[in-house]
Image: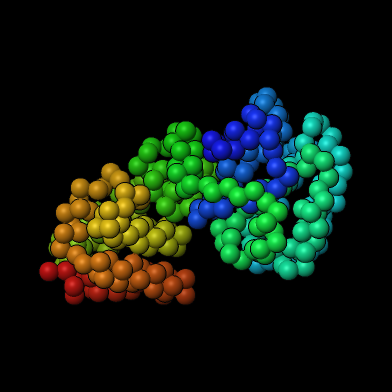
Amino acid sequence: MNTQLQQFITSEKLSHAYLMESTQRTALKQEAIQFAADILGNDDTVRSRVFNHNHSDFYWLETDEPTIKKEMIEEVLHRMNQKPVEGQYKVYVIVDFDKVTIQGENSILKFLEEPPPNTIALLLTTKPREILPTIHSRCQHISVSAQSARTALVNGGVSDELAATFTALSFGEEEANLWLEEKEFTQLRTAVLKWADTMMTDSRMGLVQIVDLLQTASDREQQLLAIDLLQLYFQDILYIKLGNDHLSFPDHQPKLEMLGKNMSLSQCVHWIDMMLAGKKNLLQYVSPMLVFEHIAIQIAKEVK
C-alpha cells in the first residue's frame, strides 16, 4: 500500500475525506480497498470481508452508468450517517467521483463540511479537474502511482513482464488472471510482438503472417486487445526515444531500441493514431482481416 496512507493509519491521524487521484483507474481501486481494509481491521477475516464488499461498516459505490446521480449519493450518505457497527470507523468509497452530477456533489459537499465522527470518505478520480474546487478544498489529496497496480499483480504471482503489459492496459488482478487462465493472453502477446517485429523488418512477410496472427486472435475480444497491444508496441518505441522507462514490454526493449533507431517521433505518433483508427473500425464490425491488412499496408509504405 501507499506508504503515505500507511503512515496515516499508524499515526492515527486519519482525515474525514481523501481525494485519491491517478491516471490508472485500476491502481486507484486497489489502493482504496487496501486502505479501507487497513482502516477497518488488521485481522485477515475482517480484511477479507472488506475485499469481498461484505462488511457492515464499508460501502463501495461503483456504477457503469454515465453519471452518478444524486439518489446514489444520498444512499451512501444515509448509510454513513449511522454509527459504526463492528469497530471504530465507517469507510465509504466512490469510484469515478468525477461522474457525480452537480446535484450529487452539492449533497456530498454538505456531508464533507460536517461529517459524522469516525466516518472516512475515499473519493476516486482519474479526472480531478472535473470536480468542484469546493470538494477539493475539503479533502486530503493522495496521488496513486500506476506502479502500485503492477506491484499488486507481481505479488499475486504474475511475471513482471506480463504485469507491465497488464498495467499499461489498465487491467486489475482479477481481469489479468482471467485473461491468463481462460483467454490465452501470453500466446496473444507473443503473437502480436512477433507480427509487429516482422512488419517492421519485412513488411511483405508481415502481410502474409496476418493469417497466423488472426488464428491466435480468433475472436473479437482478442482482436480488439491485439490492436491495443500494437498501440503499446509503438508507444514503447516512442517512450524509448523520449527516455521514458515505463515500458509495456520491458522484456522486448532491446528489439524496440534497435527498431526505433530508424523511426522518427512523428512516425511513432502516426502509427499510434493508426491503431486507434483500426480499433474504431473493429468496433464498427469491419472485417478483422481488412483492418489488419490496412494497418500492414500503411506501415509497409513507410518502412524502408
User: How are the residues colored?
Assistant: rainbow
Of residue 203 and residue 123, the one placed in the foreground of this image is 123
Residue 6 position in % (x across, y down): 59, 33
In this picture, residue 267 sits left or right of residue 93: left
The image quadrant where one finds the N terminus is: top right
Residue 79 position in % (x across, y down): 83, 48
Of residue 103 and residue 85, the one placed in the foreground of this image is 103
Q: Is residue 209 above or below residue 58?
A: below
Residue 250 position in % (x across, y down): 30, 45
In this picture, residue 54 sits left or right of residue 223: right
Q: In this view, does 150 lie above or below 214?
A: above
Residue 10 position in % (x across, y down): 63, 29
In this picture, residue 215 sits left or right of residue 176: left
Q: In this view, does 205 lie above or below 146?
A: below
Q: Can residue 52 be seen in this view?
A: no
Of residue 216 and residue 113, the one placed in the foreground of this image is 113
Q: Which residue is drawn at 37% across and 39% down?
A: 160
Q: Which residue is drawn at 24% across and 58% down?
A: 241
